[in-house]
Structure formats: structure tokens, C-alpha cells
Image: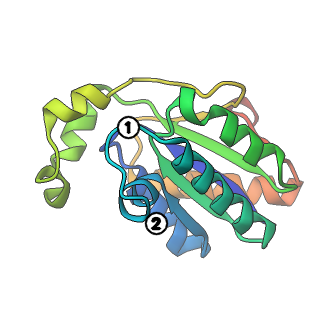
Amino acid sequence: MATLVVLRGNSGSGKSTVARALQRELGAVWIEQDHFRRVILGEHGNYSPLSVVLIEQAAAQSLVHGRTVVMDGIFNSSGYSESLRRLRDGHDGPSLFYSYDLTFDETLRRHQSRPGKVADFGEPQMRGWYHGWNPLDGITEQRITAQESLAQITRRIASDIMAATTTNRRDIGQDEI
């Protein structure tokens, strides 16, 4: 059963690392917000309506074709809540939403462990992008904390997917898992 998994968090939190691991483990379609915005659309800076629509349509088409989708990005609440609600409500399978709840210092520490990205941007830019906990409107998200390792996060999400697909639940909240 096609499942929608959304990983949100500040830049440098670890979203893409988890998404890549889930793609390998599940054979899922990986939709990375930064790739769509920067590479496909050539955008830098603020979000355009086109990027929101393109990301939503790519995810929706993948779900329609029976593929599990793992999306990762900042997906700020003001720009993406409506789009992500449409995705959740527009398919018959489960939808699981996760968001990193990390301090700025922890986010910066994680970013500094990525040599390729450190050259692209640093602390000043990250301070400007950092929003702390920024929950989506109308969507229950499960928190990912600094205490969880990549393996633990990946196992937890894979387990949540298995539970959601075996019980045929569409939307599982933090208190239900």
C-alpha cells in the first residue's frame, strides 16, 4: 500500500540522511524539496508557488501509481500546510508526518559534520533560516529529537509504516503509535 512519509526540519537537521536511508530500505520515491527548488527550478531564496505545486504533484502522481513517497524539506508551515493536507487527504494509504525538534546549536553541530554542505552555507545563513518547532496547520506530526540516532529514526519510521499498512490506518498521530 502506498504510504506518504513527510520529514520536516530546519536546514542541517538530518532529514535527507533519513530520507535516503528510507528510500534504500523501502524502495520509496524520494522527493527532496531542495533538489526540486534548486536543481529542477533553479530557485534560490524564497519559495515560489511553482515549487510548492510541482512538489505536491510529483508526490501525488507517485502515490497514485502505488509508490511509497518519502518527502524531505523545511516545508515551512505557512507555505506547505495546505499542500501537505491535500496530499494526506488525497490518497487512500497511510500518511505519516515527522518533524525534527532540535535546538539551533544541535542543528549547527549536525551541519558542521557535512563537509560538502559547510562550504555552501554556514552559521549566519542557518540562523536566518532557523524557525525552531514550526508545526504544520491541521496535521499531527511526530517529533524527532537529538537523542535519536539515524538507525533509531529509520527503524521507528519503518515500523510505523508497517503498523499503518497492516492496520489500514490513514493518519497516525504521536499518541497512537
Q: Secondary structure at mark 2?
A: helix
Which label lies toward us, 1 or 2? 2
Residue shown at 63%/42% (left/top)? 97
Task: Compare residues 148 and 44 and report the one nearer the observer.
Answer: 44
Give above or below for 126 relative to 17: above
Image point (53%, 69%), residue name: 23
Q: Nearer the viewer, residue 86 or 47?
A: 47
Task: Give the secondary structure at mark 1.
Answer: loop
The residue labelled by disc 1 is: 147
Residue drawn at 57 percent across, 41 percent down:
98
Left or right: where 17 falls relative to 142: left
How far apart are the alpha carbons under marks 1 and 2?
Answer: 18 Å
Quadrant including the N terminus: bottom right
The image quarter containing residue 148 is: top left
Percent position of residue 163, x then y: 77, 54
Disc number placed over residue 21 in the picture, else none: 2
Reply above or below: 176 against 166: above
